[in-house]
């Protein structure tokens, strides 16, 4: 039992390990992660060869998952800028469709499993935790599919090495499909999962990968809109430049409010015209009653007629409210 706990569940062919370790970007990442290689009391007594396997698999998981976490952090920052809010419950509103679903999925998982996503802790425990839940397995598969995707992916952008703010192409991470056969075999030999779960999990992970790609596309559009300048606004004191625009989302919201204030253009019916005329006549009647009450006190009839808007000899006209 102790030997089973001391062994990694993943079996990667030796030639794949050598090819992976020979990549410059992955080697830089491993040098950075080597500073955090403290094993727990359960795995500290493993032999050096086994610990080296744990570290390699931990580094491989880090190279897979951290670009997705970086994508989520960037998407959150863009959503905050677009919506002008720091309320995490509202950030999903910056995205739509399957991209919103991918954002919500990453938001829930990263908040609950941030230590695993950042591979913090014992390398062996981090590696074995990959098989702990379906969410861990699905995200690992999706990250591997994203690393081999021909479209713009997190691995091909700014999440290649943790030591470089703007990494060069030579230090970007390589495609990482090595985890897929190793993960499939690990699930098949696992006493809890068994071989019947791989097809279902891979299908769900493939859909998550496609949804994350939509999220990447919306992040690209959102970033260009957030960074675009707002139009110049003018006031009585002269032209004044306002800061950068939050996003097209706010512009659409403002435009929608403006349209709502204007209202829809409708044709005024005869009934509406009659109601408006009745309203005006009612106000006129109230004014006349007040003037008549005041005029009866001491004002002569000639002046009273002038105040009521009637000329000498003019008769009262018929109206809708008093025929």
Image (tube, rainbow, N blue to C red):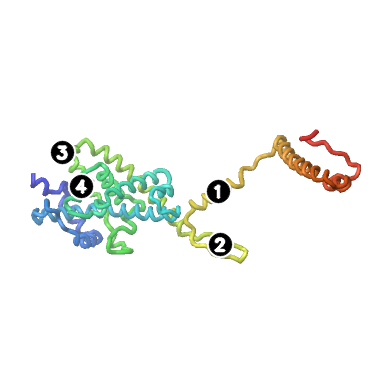
Mark 4 is surrounded, within 10 Å at the Cα level, by few (under 14), some (14 to 19) or many (20 or more) other residues, namely few
* Disc 1: which residue: 257
Q: Residue at x 26, y 54 (%)?
A: 118
* Disc 3: which residue: 191
* Disc 4: which residue: 129
Mark 3 is surrounded, within 10 Å at the Cα level, by few (under 14), some (14 to 19) or many (20 or more) other residues, namely few
Q: Are marks 1 and 4 in contact (CB under 8 Å)?
A: no
Q: State the residue in front, 14 or 286.
A: 286
Q: Position of residue 206 (x, y in %)?
A: 31, 43
Q: Position of residue 141 (x, y in %)?
A: 27, 46
Q: CA distance from mark 4 to mark 3?
A: 15 Å
Residue farthest toward the front in the current orientation of the protein: 297
Q: Are marks 1 and 2 in contact (CB under 8 Å)?
A: no
Q: Residue at x 49, y 58 (%)?
A: 245
Q: State the residue in front, 161 or 43.
A: 43
* Disc 2: which residue: 232
Name the front one of labels 3 and 1. 1
Q: Are marks 3 and 1 in contact (CB under 8 Å)?
A: no
As helix, strand or loop, the secondary structure at mark 3 comes to loop
Report the side of 315 relative to 192 (left or right).
right
As helix, strand or loop, the secondary structure at mark 4 comes to helix
Report the side of 235 relative to 53 (left or right).
right
Residue 194, placed above or below residue 45: above
In primary-sequence order, the first of circles 1 and 4 is 4
Q: Are marks 4 and 3 in contact (CB under 8 Å)?
A: no
Q: Which quadrant, please, contains the C terminus?
A: top right
């Amino acid at each position: 039992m102790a030997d089973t706990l001391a062994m990694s569940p993943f079996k990667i062919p030796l030639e794949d390990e050598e090819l992976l370790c020979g990549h410059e970007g992955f080697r830089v990442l491993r040098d950075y992660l080597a500073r955090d290689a403290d094993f727990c009391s359960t795995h500290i007594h493993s032999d050096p060869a086994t610990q080296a396997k744990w570290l390699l698999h931990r580094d491989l998981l880090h190279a897979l998952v951290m670009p997705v976490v970086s994508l989520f952090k960037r998407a959150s920052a863009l959503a905050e800028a677009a919506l002008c809010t720091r309320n995490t419950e509202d950030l999903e509103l910056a995205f739509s469709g399957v991209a919103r679903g991918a954002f919500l999925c990453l938001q829930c998982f990263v908040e609950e499993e941030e230590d695993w996503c950042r591979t913090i802790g014992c390398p062996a425990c981090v590696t074995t935790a990959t098989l702990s839940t379906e969410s861990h397995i699905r995200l690992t598969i999706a990250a591997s599919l994203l690393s081999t995707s021909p479209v713009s992916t997190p691995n091909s952008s700014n999440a290649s090495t943790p030591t470089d703010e703007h990494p060069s192409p030579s230090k970007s991470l390589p495609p990482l499909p090595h985890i897929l056969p190793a993960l499939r075999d690990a699930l098949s030999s696992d006493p809890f999962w068994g071989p019947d779960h791989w097809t279902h999990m891979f299908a769900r992970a493939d859909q998550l990968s496609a949804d994350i790609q939509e999220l990447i596309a919306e992040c690209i559009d959102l970033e260009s809109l957030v960074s675009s300048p707002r139009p110049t606004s003018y006031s009585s004191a002269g032209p004044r430049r306002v800061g950068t625009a939050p996003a097209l989302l706010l512009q659409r919201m403002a435009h929608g409010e403006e349209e709502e204030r204007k209202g829809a253009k409708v044709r005024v019916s005869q009934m509406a015209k009659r109601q408006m005329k009745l309203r005006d006549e009612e106000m006129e009647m109230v004014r006349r009653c007040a003037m008549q009450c005041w005029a009866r006190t001491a004002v002569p009839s000639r002046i009273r007629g002038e105040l009521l808007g009637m000329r000498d000899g003019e008769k009262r006209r018929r109206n809708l409210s008093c025929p």
